[in-house]
Image (cartoon, helix red, strand yellow):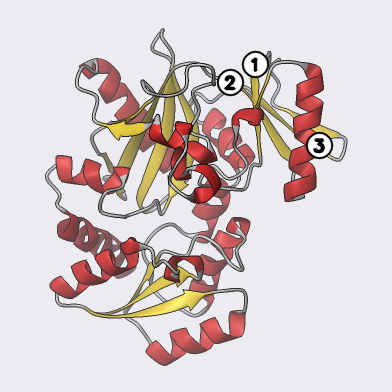
Amino acid sequence: MKIVILHTKDAAGPPEDPVLGQIEGALRAEGHETSRVMVDGDVEPLVVALRRDRPDLVFNLAEAFGGKSALESNVAALLNLLGLRYTGSSPAGLIQAGDKTLTKKVLSFHGIRTAKFATVYRGAVDWAGDEIAFPLIVKPPQEDASIGVTQKSIVRTPQELLQTIGALQAEYQSPALIEQFIEGREFYVGVLGNANARALPVVELDFSKFPTDRPKIASYEAKWGEDGGGTGAEFEGTESVFPEELDEELGKRMQQVAVDAFQALRLRDYARIDLRVTDGGEIYVIEVNPNCYLERQGEFARAAERAGVPYQELIATIVELATARYAR
């Protein structure tokens, strides 16, 4: 097929995100013809490029429009308007999973456990119906990649809460999502498929080398390092590993929760579900990532390989899943 890889401007670099070349290589190894189209902040050039290339399928890696991740769903909506076939979730799935507040409401409706929460914006409070107690974590509800999540996001007093809400609203011009902070281990579970979606092996975010004086959270620094540079105590103190001594029954329950969340939000093709598990074995969904990062050394691709799906086959499977949806 003729496949366009759709990506954001920041992925083009410099430096270029390695996932572009990796997916391109995997697609070409499968016999597909590939090209790239970049999403920036202007609709017209994007439409012109997509109409010019007239692809059989768009491999949609665009997680933002004009640098705004809250507009990710609009890119998929544009592909719909142009009558193009594409990989990954629909605008509806991206909207639901992209708004953490809405995600939590939908999951709660389906009986899937999430942390108690409330949202605050310009003095208006939306309570979830349950009382929440300190410590709390405060974050922007429509950002991904842990943007806006730092050690200051964990608050223990009303004064800290008000200060953090004010700072967050000033920076992001959005509501503040306030959640009860869940102490426990953190896990990532990939889901691959559609009607018969299956969970991949469980990955744990290991905090054993994390600074002992800081709450164990997957902050922006833990994921990307100080200033995004891949350095710093939190970045160096976390590692994604396959847990060797994970209780088998707990692992199966986490995988089932991940598939349930995937289906409740009506996601498509592939996604990663982030979980927290308490010492008592309670499983909480803390974030849902449709169209998750597919870099070869990322959690999703590594989990797929552990399940017997090497990288080239993984990319081919995503293409096949998308193509089958449209064939139906």
Amino acid residing under circle 1: Pro
| Of the image marks 3 and 1, the number of the one nearer the N terminus | 1
Q: Residue beneath label 3, please?
A: 166
Q: Are marks 2 and 3 in contact (CB under 8 Å)?
A: no
Label 2: state its secondary structure: loop
Q: Residue beneath label 1, please?
A: 135
Q: What residue is drawn where x is 59% and y is 40%?
A: 100
The residue carrying pointer 1 sits among few (fewer than 14), some (14 to 19) or many (20 or more) residues within 10 Å by Cα, namely some
Q: Quadrant of the N terminus?
A: bottom left
Does 175 appear above or below 184?
Answer: below
Q: What residue is drawn where x is 36% and y is 20%?
A: 208
Q: In which quarter of the image is residue 313?
A: bottom left
Q: Residue beneath label 2, please?
A: 181
Given residues 64 and 85, the one toward you in this image is 64
Label 3: state its secondary structure: helix
Label 1: state its secondary structure: loop
